Amino acid sequence: MSTRKVALVTGGSRGIGAAVADRFAREGWDLTISARGQEALDARAELLREHGGRVLSVAADSTDEGAVAALIARHVEEYGRTDALVVNAGMGLKGGFADFPARRFDRLYQVNVRAPFQLMQGLLPSLRTAVDVAGAAKIVAISSITGVYPEPEMAAYGATKAALISMCETFNLEESVNGVAATSIAPGYVDTDMSEWTKGEGAIPGDEMISADDVATVAFAVTQLSRWAVLPQAVLTRPGPNLHRA
Ligand SMILES: NC(=O)c1ccc[n+]([C@@H]2O[C@H](COP(=O)([O-])OP(=O)(O)OC[C@H]3O[C@@H](n4cnc5c(N)ncnc54)[C@H](OP(=O)(O)O)[C@@H]3O)[C@@H](O)[C@H]2O)c1
């Protein structure tokens, strides 16, 4: 079993996941990162290894139950413990309620809710192992402010993110007493590829959005809490009148 702390970060090849993985690596943790694209993952893993830890990069599409199961198995085989699971891989789709296609809703649900459920359930034994070794283990789920404060054209996306928050709450009711606790982080717009559509002229400049490093700071802080402190939910907003908006 790894003698260092270990985190698994989904969507770790870019954006928020890459910033989170970078923070853990700098703090001396071993890592597994996953996403769909193997090439981008391997390039990211190479950079992370410069901080001196072990980094496993495993391609897995969140819509593929078998691939997610293989990711879990490979991670557990490599490290034998999980001190932090960061369920971050997600997708966003925008569209009016009147004509949003149900099959798009299904895909959002698979990526943003079903895969996190599978990961939280599948990694629970190795999270419990980390509790035995280190006293506590944490799950950090990257939700969205639209899961807390609904916005027009975000019915499907917001519903998946609200489901993720709810899942973490129920997880805590059952598991936090044993030392594994979950925190959902619900950010407004974060400066990544995903928010590209809303940047630029007349919109929100990227440098006025929450940074991926801001989210990483909160995610890492959660892992510093003892088993006796549970932070169920953290909303991270932009300044000014945007307080309850993305
Ligand atoms: N950016 C925002 O404004 C914002 C705000 C609130 C919440 N969030 C949430 O934050 C999380 C990360 O978003 P981000 O902004 O960092 O997005 P991003 O820059 O687009 O990165 C998404 C990451 O997830 C991976 N990914 C995407 N679809 C996947 C799939 N089906 N299976 C496995 N991996 C997949 C991507 O790699 P591949 O493409 O190679 O798979 C990439 O590593 C998401 O859950 C998002 O909903 C974002």
Image (spheres, helix red, strand yellow):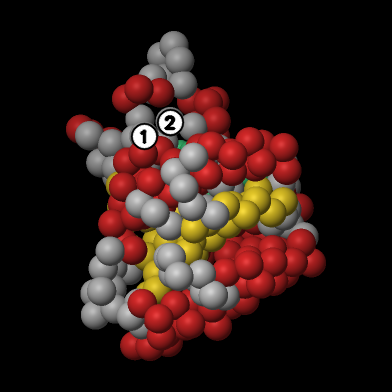
Counting other residues with Cα less than 10 Å from the Cα at mark 2, is it few (<14), some (14-19), or many (20 or more)? many
For image coordinates 37% across by 65% down, the residue present is 183
For image coordinates 47% across by 83% down, the residue present is 128
In this rendering, the answer to whether 65 lies above or below 146 is below
Give the left or right position of residue 67, taking residue 195 as reference.
right
For image coordinates 32% across by 69% down, the residue present is 232
> Would you name the residue on which mark 2 appears?
191
The label on residue 73 is none
Amino acid type indicated by mark 2: Asp
Give coordinates of residue 79: x percent, y percent: 57, 69
Q: Is residue 46 visible?
A: yes
Q: Quadrant of the N terminus?
A: bottom right
Q: Quadrant of the C terminus?
A: top left
Q: Nearer the viewer, residue 59 or 65?
A: 59
Give coordinates of residue 37: x percent, y percent: 72, 41
What secondary structure is marked by label 2? loop
Determine if the C-beta at disc 2 is less than 8 A from ligand 1: yes
> Would you name the residue on which mark 1 appears?
211
The tally of labels here is: 2
Quadrant location, ligand no. 1: top right
Q: Nearer the viewer, residue 82 or 161?
A: 82
Give coordinates of residue 4: x percent, y percent: 43, 65
For image coordinates 62% across by 54% down, the residue present is 56
Using the numbered discs, state the Cα–Cα distance from disc 1 to disc 2 in whole angstroms.
5 Å
Q: Quadrant of residue 120?
A: bottom right
Contact check, label 1 and label 2, Cβ < 8 Å: yes
Whichever of labels 1 and 2 marks the residue nearer the N terminus, that label is: 2
In this rendering, the answer to whether 26 lies above or below 233 is above
Q: Is residue 89 visible?
A: no
Seen as rendered, the residue at the extreme left is 240
